[in-house]
Image: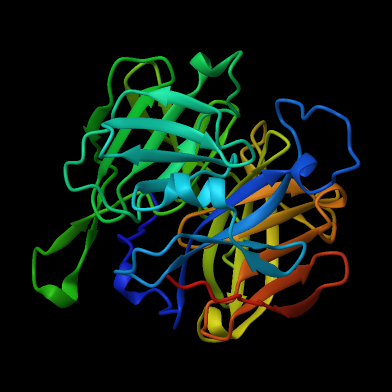
Amino acid sequence: MSTKPSIDRASQPDHALYDLPFLASYRASDMDTNTTSTPSRRGVCVPYLALKHATGSDDQPVFYTVSEKKATIDVDAAGELENRNCWATPQGCVLVRNAAASSTYLLDLHNPSTMIQLPHLPDDGLSSFCTCLLSDYPDLAASDMCLVLLIEPDGPVIRYCHVGGDEWVEHEYDIGALDLPDEGEGYSEKLVICLIAACNGKFYFNGGFDELGVLEFSPAPVFSSIAIRNAIEEPFGCQKEVLVESGQELFMVSLLAATDLNALYRVQVHRMDFSAQEWCEVDDDIGGRAFLLSPWYFGASRAAAECGLEPDCVYMPYAGTKRMMLIYSLSWEILTFSHVKLLFFGK
């Protein structure tokens, strides 16, 4: 397995007023009042960034709409998330743990009154920085096929449950260790899952150019890996990779920078060919979709034309403190920045 150390959350960019902890989404019908169509199971979602006030604040979360380039508060959605543990998913739902009511559920932000109930999640010192994914796009008709996965950021621990199941299961995994010679002879650190995406019922993690981790449930967790054939060299200046599921295919987005993510100059995208077990470079076309990256958590994919976004582009909050949204066009190989207009809401 590729040597990926645990994530040091303290080293993440310190936003002066807001943390950017997760991506969420609203369905297109909530933005377009003229539409009369009913969203399908894999309905198109208008992307939002959920902005939480700086650590220690009890204020409501603020939603920044990428397409409209402005921040707002949705009273119903924010009320469901206020003062509660919550973890967003690439599929658009948010896992909410309401300690006061001893309840845990999946919340679809476009309809906060609709919840998918889950077994109550034990606290056990849960980190607010956990990554959460669903094995599929849930709906009320087929939700029992969906598995909810919660991944600790700094230790080899996962928690999971099935929709309609009776309990959460905690599992400590072992995917190898990273030697730390600078710490002294014999020192090492257990490898943890740092980046992950769900695709066709399986979870793929710690993607690299030579190996890709695989996690599947049958029903207990089973870890394996795919050795990449004809492995290509990591692009020069690659600072981070992010895995994204799009159209039931797996992509790896490489962020290239001269020094760190504050100096990003290019984005590369590769698609996994599972039959050949190879990463294939994507030149300029990701099917008219837009990739939205939250680099410390996950990536999501949306149909750009139905979301008011630019097609074949990668969106990402700028890693610095300049309150900007990075937009990279794969078609034109042009990197632009959009200013984030933050409206200030106080108590």
Across and down, in percent, residue 163 comes to: 44, 20
Across and down, in percent, residue 259 comes to: 51, 86
Residue visible at 40% across and 52% down in the picture = 82
Across and down, in percent, residue 332 comes to: 88, 71
Splitting the image into 4 quarters, where does residue 97 fall?
top left
Across and down, in percent, residue 155 comes to: 23, 51
144 w.r.t. 138: above or below: above
| Residue 236 visible in the current orientation | no
Q: Is residue 199 left or right of residue 4?
A: right
Q: Is residue 300 left or right of residue 283?
A: left
202 w.r.t. 250: above or below: above
The colour scheme is: rainbow
Residue visible at 82% across and 73% down in the picture = 333
Residue visible at 35% across and 56% down in the picture = 129
Splitting the image into 4 quarters, where does residue 68 fall?
bottom right
Q: How many marks?
A: 0
In the image, farthest residue toward the left: 185
| Residue 56 visible in the current orientation | yes
84 w.r.t. 61: above or below: above
Q: Quadrant of the C terminus?
A: bottom left
Splitting the image into 4 quarters, where does residue 326 fall?
bottom right
- 346 or 293, which lies in front? 346
Residue visible at 42% across and 47% down in the picture = 87
Q: Is residue 118 left or right of residue 88?
A: left
- 332 or 52, which lies in front? 52
